[in-house]
Image: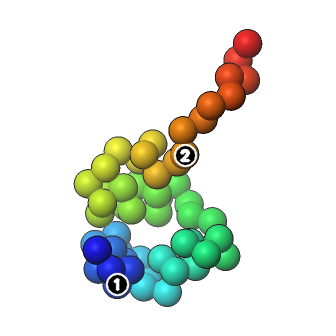
Amino acid sequence: MSQEQLAEKAQVHRTYIGMLERGEKNATITTLFRLSNALCIPTYELFPEERDNYCE
């Protein structure tokens, strides 16, 4: 899927997707939900797996 297609499905500006990929912008929780819905994945899959257990 292109950045433009993802932006259209997620209802965000196409340049915003590039900024997210380059780490120039941080997504809001609303944008994260929009992106995960556009990608047809659960929102938690947008984040790398946490390997450290901070609740010991």
User: In the depicted view, which residue is nearer to us: 50 or 55?
Assistant: 50
Q: Which residue is mark 2?
A: 48
The residue shown at (54%, 45%) is 48
Disc 1 residue type? Glu
Cα distance, mark 1 to mark 2?
24 Å
The residue shown at (70%, 17%) is 55
Disc 2 residue type? Pro
Which picture quadrant has residue 20?
A: bottom right
Above or below 19: residue 39: above
The residue shown at (44%, 83%) is 13
Above or below 30: residue 11: below
Above or below 43: residue 23: below
Q: Secondary structure at mark 1?
A: helix
Q: Secondary structure at mark 2?
A: loop
Q: Which residue is mark 1?
A: 4
Q: Nearer the viewer, mark 1 or mark 2?
A: 2
Determine whether, in the image, residue 35 is placed left or right of residue 38.
right
Q: Inspect this view and state whether residue 8 appears.
A: no
The residue shown at (65%, 71%) is 23
- Color encoding of the figure: rainbow
Counting from the top left corner in percent of width and height, residue 5 is at: 29, 80
Q: Residue furthest top?
A: 56
Counting from the top left corner in percent of width and height, residue 26 is at: 63, 66
Q: Residue furthest front?
A: 51
Quadrant where the N terminus lies? bottom left
